[in-house]
Each structure stands twice: as structure tokens, then as C-alpha cells.
Amino acid sequence: MTVTLHGYKFSVYSRIPRMICHEKGIELEWVEVNPFDDTTPESYETLHPFRRVPVLQHDDFTLYETGAISRYLDENFPGPSLQPKNPRHRARMAQTISIVDAYVYWPLVRQVFSHRVFAPRFGEPSDEDAIAAGLATSKGVLAALEDLASGDAGIISAQVTLADFHLVAMIDYFVMADEGAAMLARYEKLSAWWDGIRARDSVIQTAPL
Ligand SMILES: N[C@@H](CCC(=O)N[C@@H](CS)C(=O)NCC(=O)O)C(=O)O
């Protein structure tokens, strides 16, 4: 039984299943794929027609889309369950994952982190307008997450769930920008959640930068 993840070392989405595997004690084989590199072979499209990462392969089963991968890992492997049984908490978990995909990734990661932290670190040009736009959008996004945050161990319930790991990957990059860290600090429940979850071994062991 082999579990292989095709992912990119700096990718937030690739980090999510890595954290989940760590939490559940699943051994993972890693295949490095840089989706931003034009030299990635066309054959990769047989695994992911949109040329993104990650892709999971479990024996003869191939799966892309991180939300689906997270659930598959949680439901098919032993270890602590990362999905609440309570239907309302489960719905909040699904809602939070959807918010991360639709509203968090672009402003917090691709606009603020990429231009403020990643591009300068790797000698690439960065765009101040993109940072300003990302920060402006991030305010509303963090306010919405603060409204949903439970104030318990997990973002949406006392139990740590898949939603926590989807959000961790994004927030960890966002707070590497000084403006991101300052903005998060204004949200009490989100800050308390972040201070607790960032100490987990799965988060520390998968830190990308
Ligand atoms: N909906 C996809 C999003 C994955 C995604 O956007 N991954 C980024 C890396 S973090 C990527 O591959 N980007 C390549 C690109 O934008 O061309 C998922 O949930 O897996």
C-alpha cells in the first residue's frame, strides 16, 4: 500500500495533505512537481488536467483537489478522526474549507505573501499594488473567519479538523509579511487559534520556508 503525493515544496495546497498525513501517521512518498515551471512535462496532465498540485496516488487510485484528498485521507486511514460527527460542526468545517479556497488563497497568499515575502526572497520582482489590494481584501476575509471561529482548539469546534489544516497553510504564509502579522493580531479568536495550532508537530515539521 503506497501513498504518493505529487506536490511542490513551497505550495500551500501541497502542505495540507502533508499535515494531515503527519496527524494520522500515514507514511507519504513525495514527488516534487513545480506547477509554475514550464519544464514540467506534459505527461503530468494525465494526473492533473489543470497542471496544479497536489495529486494523491493511493495504489491504483489517483485524486486531485485538496478538499477531496483531505477527506479521503481522513476516511480511509486509521488515526485520529479529523472530521466532527456533529452535523453542524461538519457543515462549518466544509464551509471553512470552501472559504479558504474561494476567498483566502488569492489575497493572503498570492497577493500579500507572494509579493511581500516570496518574490523578494528569490530575487523576483514584486508588485506593491498587488500587496495593497491583497491587504484590503484580507481584512474582510479575516473578519468573516473571526465570526466563524469558535475560540476553542479548532477553528470551528473544540476538535481540530481538516479545516484547521486548510487554513494553517494560508495563515502561516500571510503572517510572514509584517502587515499580515499586524492584521491577524487585530482578531482575537483567530490569533488565539493561530497561537495554539502553530505549535503542533504536524505544522512545525511541514514548514516550507
Ligand atoms: N483547487 C486546487 C488548487 C490547487 C492550487 O492552486 N495549487 C497551486 C499551488 S499552491 C498551484 O498548483 N498553482 C499553479 C498555478 O496556479 O499555475 C486544489 O484544491 O488542490
Image (cartoon, rainbow, N blue to C red):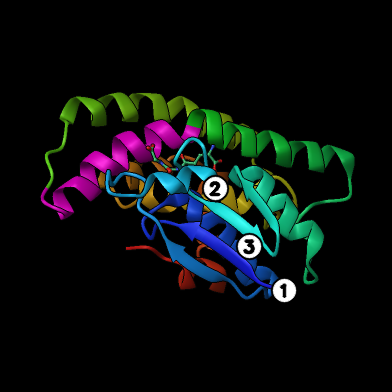
Q: Which mark is residue 20?
A: 3
Are discs 2 and 3 less than 8 Å apart at CB? no
Q: Secondary structure at mark 3?
A: helix
- Foreground tag (3 vs 1): 1
Amino acid type at image mark 1: Met
Percent from the top left, x then y, of residue 22? 61, 71
Direction from residue 155 to residue 194 in the image, left or right = left
Percent from the top left, x then y, of residue 131? 25, 32
Which is nearer the N-term, disc 2 or disc 3? Answer: 3
> Label 1 belongs to which residue?
1
Q: Secondary structure at mark 2?
A: loop
Which is nearer the N-term, disc 3 or disc 1? Answer: 1
Residue at x 38%, y 60% (from the top left corner):
9
183 to 15, vertically: above or below: above
Direction from residue 67 to residue 38 in the image, left or right = left
97 to 171, vertically: above or below: above
Q: Quadrant of residue 95?
A: top right
The magenta segment: 104-123
Residue at x 17%, y 54% (from the top left corner):
121
The front one of 197 and 77 is 77
> Label 2 belongs to which residue?
47
Percent from the top left, x then y, of residue 44? 45, 48
Q: How dense is the environment of label 2, judged by Cα within 10 Å: few (below 14), some, or many (20 and up)?
A: some
Direction from residue 49 to residue 33 in the image, left or right = left
Are discs 1 and 2 less than 8 Å apart at CB? no
Residue 62 lies in the magenta stretch: no
Determine the CA span between mark 2 and mark 3: 21 Å
Amino acid type at image mark 2: Leu
